[in-house]
Amino acid sequence: MALISTTIALVITQFLVPPISCYNHGVVDYNLKLNIITEQLGNLATTAQQILTINSENFENNYDFIVIGSGSSGAVIANRLSEIPSWRILLLETGKPGNSLTKIPIAAPVFQLTPYNWNYTMEHQDGFCLAMKDQICAWPRGKALGGTTVINYMIYTRGNPKDYNKWAAKGNDGWSYEEVLPYFLKSEKCNLGRDICHSPYHNTSGHLSVEFPFKSRITDAFLQAGQQLGEKIVDYNTPDFMGFAQIQANIKFGKRHSAADAFIYPIVNSRRNLKVVTSARVTKILIEPKTKRAYGVMFRKGGKNFIVRASREVILSAGTFNSPQLLMLSGIGPKEHLESLKIPLIKNLPVGQVLYDHIAYLGLAFTINQTVEPREALFYPSELFNWVLNGTGVYTSLAGVEALAYINTGSIPDPKYPDIELIFIGTGSLQSDFGLVVANEIRLRRDIYNAVFKPIENTPSWSIIPMLLHPESRGYLKLRSNNPYDAPLLYGNFFTDPGGKDLRTFIAAIRYIQKLSRTEAFQRFNSQIHDVPIPGCEKHVFDSDDYWVCAVRSLSSTLHHQVGTCKMGTAGDPEAVVDPRLRVHGVGGLRVVDSSVIPVTISAHTNAPSIMMGEKASDIIKEDWNVL
């Protein structure tokens, strides 16, 4: 217990709260702080790491199934397939296990500044990311056992039933809401209270814990403000979706509950038929050119190359960026692109040609006249003890995210289908950590931070991040080279829709947020919009539509929900890479199971849907091999 307390105190005092000198002088060596973060976090190991180090030695050359990637889908598949004692499963993960500090929910932003992140960036796009360093946005993805669930904000949202019904309507049999709901329920261990957990839309016996995180008292104002505008308080993980709600999170007893925590660590030593190998970088899927059947993979570990074979299937769950990258490196992708890189073609498929993403505007801040939760609470011994002993208190905060709302601003005709998600930050905005972490996480230029956010570092505030759920614009990705160690080229193409609908929806969302601020609920705090303009947008009158267009183009960023790069679809779909049973079109023994196959934009953060896909894919695989 003393070790845990010391570790927690270290991360809070060293990384999450500036030294006392910051309060007095507002001066801090940012680069030094970030270097310390990376060094310290890289050196902290947990019992889980030791277990997996033992388990990853002396692996064999032949398995029934090889699973590439241990994120939201891959961890589930490794667990469920290893339920069959006669099947031998190999799970390969490029990253390492999380450590003691990754368990702290409030520390979520820190880990995107460490080797647990692939550190991908979007390619430069004119008229976007204007406030970021080099006008380039960060696109974080997790590089750890558990994938992005080790570095994300732990928000648990499933999406609207209409999302899945659209999915099925495109010919993807088996993926309607009625058909996927049982798989959401299968994974869930609901700890949200009797009233919620005993509904038909929740389950208390799954592996993945869902709890309420910390909530400051201004979150009640957010919920009341929604009601004052005519909205309902809802459980957004039911069909009664539209409205306001406290956030539901993948935490267990107040600690992060990653996909690895839920599906890998509990079984890693008890199931002899499951082998987990970490720090293993897969460089190629091995496919027989004549039969076009996958038979194994090549990976590198400890400076050595290895080849392992799969007698049944290779299952690719490396994520929206790395799954298409590996397919193309292995000869599956657009013919002309692969030929230009001298990669022998196995199958001509539109890999990487579809990429949808949820983007969000990060610049809204509203000042208030009273402190709702003092930042010094992180130093209170009582808060530390509450978290360690009871799993409660400020340490369970999702880095300030406390509630959300699903609204329709009018861009979609169906009033029961949302176009915007409002993400409520109850204890501040980009200045809440004095610019130490989040500003660096999103690559915000220091001069812009100093001009806009630094002046309110010591002023109580709240913010809402509007997130566009169903963009008209779409991007794509390509290989940078035929070298598997080169990051892929990622093109967002945001706000390139010809009619400008995406930008108009953002402006409507900002106007809605301003209405919330003017409600009686928020005016009890004398809520006022922070009206310092973003540098580069001063030529526009503050709060005009033209100003907000400039601001949104300057300070919007991804919320890590990319989908579609290995799109699911029927054989007649010219954009499809996998079929509805997740098999790569025209290639035997190879499936893709992760958010890259999602064929439509969805009203959800992608973690819960990806876990659902892992559950459903496991049953599909068992059914195809006659063991279900």
Image: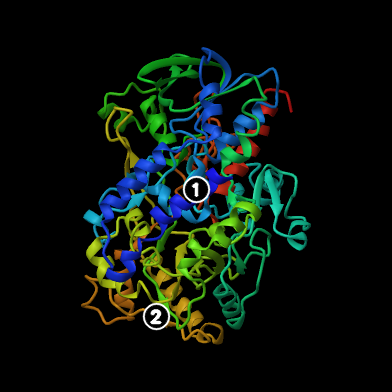
Q: Can residue 200 be seen in this view?
A: yes
Q: In this view, does 493 lie above or below 240?
A: above
Residue 169 placement (x, y as % from top left): 60, 49
Q: Judge the density around disc 2: few (<14), some (14-19), many (≥20) Cα neighbours within 10 Å.
A: some
Quarter assignment of residue 173:
top right
Kindly identify which residue carries mark 1: 6
Q: Which amino acid, by three-letter code, is at mark 2?
A: Ile
- Where residue 537 appears, as percent x and y from the top left, is 24, 73
Residue 355 in percent (x, y) is at 41, 47
Position of the N terminus by quadrant: top right
Which residue is tagged 2?
A: 529
Q: Nearer the viewer, residue 165 or 91?
A: 91
Q: Which amino acid does label 1 sit on?
A: Thr
- Apparent side of residue 608 relative to residue 347 in the rendered image (left or right): right
Distance from the alpha carbon under mark 1 to that under mark 2: 39 Å
Q: Point out the tag, 1 or 2, that comes first from the N-terminus.
A: 1
